[in-house]
Image (cartoon, rainbow, N blue to C red):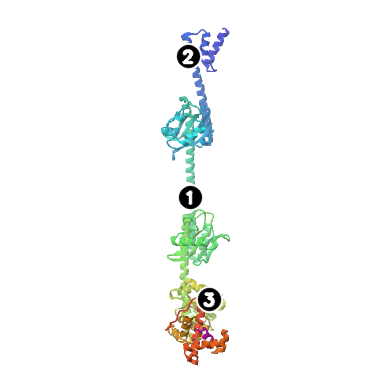
Amino acid sequence: MSEDAAAAAATLIEAAGGTGAVGYAELTAALARLGVTGDEGTRLAGTVDRLRREQDRLRRREHELAALFSSARELAELRDTDALLQRLVRRAHEMMGGDVTYLSEFDPETRELRVRVTDGSVSAQFQRLRVPPGRGLASVIVETRTPQWLSRYQVYRADRHEPSIDAAVAAEGIVSILGVPMLSGDEVLGVLFVANREEYEFAPEETALLSALADHAAVVLHTAQSLRRLQHSEDEARRALDRLTGHLAERDRANTVHQQLVRAVLAGGGFAPVAETLATALGRPVMIIDDRDQVLAADGPAPPADDPLNRVDEPTRAAIEDSRRSGHCVAVGGRDGREGSDGSRTVAALSAGRRYFGAILLGEGEFGLGPVDRRTVERAAQVGALLALQQEAGAEAERRVRSEVVADLLAAAPERYADVERRARRLGVVPADLDALILFAVPGEHRGTAVRTLGPLCGDRALVGEHRGFVVAAYPAARLAIEPEELRVRVGQAIQAPVLAVPTAVSAGALPAAVAVALRTARLLAALGIEDGTASTDDYLPYSALLDTDATALNAFLDETIGPIRRYDSARGTDLLGTLRAFVRSNASPTRTARALSFHPNTILQRLDRLDQLLGRTWRDDERLFRIGIAARLDELRERLSARSNAPPKSEPTG
């Protein structure tokens, strides 16, 4: 075979094997050199050309299948969804040979498509693109669930264009686009795109290849969504288990607390076991206060010095008021009035009907109070109210006994004294030690409250009770650290009403006589219109012994003796009454009166002349001066006591 024929044969073999770049013209020339021309040459050239194209197709298909198998292997091996999608998009980019390849994920709630992964993109705007429902080529693919492509995006239907999409496409320089849906059954998971920056007609084989890759991407997204749902279900199950475990723990704590509270009530241990039980079960400091914010019991870890649990501040007081109204425990400063899950401070009021006995204050703990814990605290508050009622009933019974002993001690019945003394000693009181007495004038509806207030203040060695419409406290003076005025103020604060206190000393075995003096003094002051203040019996002893304690008669006496002077001073702004008081204190001596008032004697004589005109010339006679002197001194004492108590005396009739 000649060299020319051998070269022609080599060309035919190269063309039939699908290697090299042998064109149709070269193939025809090679056949002619071998002597094959005409129709036979044309037929043979066509056959060789078809074989060459088939070889190219098979080789390309083999490459695509190898890539798909590699992608499938990665699906089985990798667990990172983002990494898998990035590899799939990069492989599609390499196999399709486009300029830009990207994957958009479909949101079934908003029906938006969000670009999630890109390859070949140069525009940040395009990489953040969101396609709203009904816009762009992507929405058509979602709606039809079929592949779609455009050789020129710019001439696409106007009703599908969106300014944000057009701007992103223009920024990327995209002209032609092919997109295929990623499906899982009938559910659209997203769209896989390949795009070129020049006009291009996509072939069916390219659509099929991109669809195969989209199926792999759909598997990835579907698996990721399934894993998310499984993770969500697992989290929900774990939270439900935690809630159940917490609920069971709360129930166990509640059962323990309820049993211990019942034992505390039956044992009569007071409030301390209640505080200890709650502090131990709930792991936080607990304090129980009474209606005057005094601590009854406390237990648990000591709160810091600046902790609000150490004082009843305004937020705590507001929470207590909320608890009184609702009957539930309330978080201090809580948003909804109930304890949250942050372990914050909590209060529960001790109340029964409209009665308020105090509150349970719980400090911050390591865990929040659940519903069962809150009900446990509320149950403890009910137990606390029951204890308060129980203690109140016991205290009321003891007060009645003490009041009876007080009444019998003051009754001045010698034949019963031995029996009364025995009863007093059973109460821990030694009658012979009662060397001081205070009589309190209190409105009738408040006497019980006054007795309950004075009892703890005067101590166990004192006797407090009601006697002839007054409240009486008899006590050893050496054992009482509170002054009578302080006692009067405390009683006034408790009843929110005026209180008159009349203290007096008691001689040995002379309680009835002492209370009789105090009664006369209190009635005299009441006749003078004094309802508030502290007055000693010594100051009023002469007047209470001499004068009638009827208010009308006493005021008539004062008006008859010094009434004209009061009216004169009131009308003219003078102080003749002051001159009269000084004259009486100076034993009716004008000279001494002038020295006492630091006036010239002639001024005093002029004022005495004016008194002659008001009272008559005989007012300085012994009998009249005695009466006028008593009235002036008594009126001065009343005025002084009224000034101390900041309450003006009741005006006397002017007749």
Location of mark 3 (residue):
485
Magenta stretch holds residue 421: no
Which amino acid does the dot numbered 2 rest on?
Gly
Which contiguous range is marked in magenta?
576-582
- Disc ID at residue 243: 1
Residue at mark 1 to residue at mark 3: CA–CA distance: 59 Å
Q: Quadrant of the C terminus?
A: bottom left
Location of mark 2 (residue):
46
Q: Quadrant of residue 478?
A: bottom right
Label 3's element? helix
User: Against 101, is 435 above or below?
Assistant: below
* Percent of width and height locating residue 501: 50, 78
Q: Is residue 398 visible?
A: no
* Percent of width and height locating residue 260: 49, 61
Q: Earlier in the sequence, mark 3 or mark 2?
A: 2
Q: How many marks?
A: 3
Give the residue drawn at x 52%, y 87%: 606
Q: Earlier in the sequence, mark 1 or mark 3?
A: 1
Residue at mark 1 to residue at mark 2: CA–CA distance: 79 Å
Which amino acid does the dot numbered 3 rest on?
Glu
* Along the line of sight, the residue nearer the viewer: 364 or 258: 364
